Image (tube, rainbow, N blue to C red):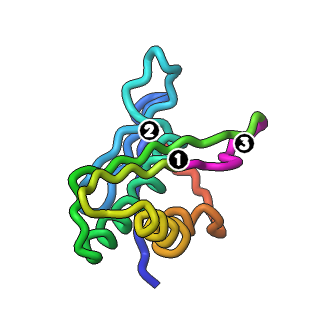
């Protein structure tokens, strides 16, 4: 089993920073849209699933010896009205710019990328465990 980890640290009430062991950082905030400077955790879920499937899709198209001139994913999540406001569904529109790819082969690649190879989409149903600890200030 391959383990991954990040450490998330509070910078301010609505600002956090996530750092992985390599030192790569992601800034996160929960501000209202008029003050927003970074993606929210729920934005990052959409970004993660879209980018994960994108990498797999592009590599598969190139393995098929197709030209990938451009690639974009428009991800939209429909959130529940209650708390927690989880994603009830996520729709991703994959747009490939290629002079030699067909709609049929691209649709097949996208299905494989999202349903079979994307670790993020598979993780959306992961079992989540947790623990807690309080550190006393000296």
Q: Which mark is residue 84?
A: 3
Provide the residue designation for mark 2: 10
Q: Nearer the viewer, mark 3 or mark 2?
A: 3
Return the x and y of residue 47 as percentages of the image width and height: 43, 48
Q: Are marks 3 and 2 in contact (CB under 8 Å)?
A: no
Return the x and y of residue 59 as percentages of the image width and height: 29, 70
Pick whichever, 110 or 47, lies toward us: 110
Q: Quadrant of the C terminus?
A: top left
CA gap between label 1 and label 2 equals: 17 Å
Provide the residue designation for mark 1: 136
Residue visible at 37% across and 59% down?
54
Secondary structure at numbered mark 2:
strand
Tell me if 66 is positioned left or right of 105 in this view. left
Which badge, 3 or 1, is on the more N-terminal residue?
3
Q: Which mark is residue 28?
A: none
Pick whichever, 71 or 50, lies toward us: 71
Return the x and y of residue 71 as percentages of the image width and height: 31, 51
CA gap between label 3 and label 2 equals: 21 Å
- Any part of residue 2 in sight: yes
Residue visible at 34% across and 45% down?
26
- The answer to whether residue 127 is above or below residue 20 is below
Tell me if 131 is positioned left or right of 88 in this view. left
Q: Which region shows up in magenta?
A: 82-91
CA gap between label 3 and label 1 equals: 30 Å
């Amino acid at each position: 089993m391959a383990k991954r980890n990040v450490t998330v640290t509070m910078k301010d009430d609505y600002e956090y920073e996530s750092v992985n062991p390599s030192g790569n950082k992601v800034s996160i905030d929960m501000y209202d849209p008029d003050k927003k400077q970074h993606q929210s955790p729920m934005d990052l879920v959409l970004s993660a699933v879209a980018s994960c499937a994108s990498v797999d899709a592009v590599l598969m198209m190139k393995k098929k010896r197709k030209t990938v001139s451009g690639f974009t994913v428009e991800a939209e999540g429909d959130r529940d009205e209650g708390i927690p406001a989880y994603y009830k569904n996520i729709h991703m529109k994959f747009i490939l710019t290629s002079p030699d790819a067909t709609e049929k082969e691209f649709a097949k690649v996208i299905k494989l990328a999202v349903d079979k190879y994307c670790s993020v989409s598979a993780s959306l149903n992961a079992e989540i465990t947790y623990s807690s600890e309080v550190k006393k200030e000296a």
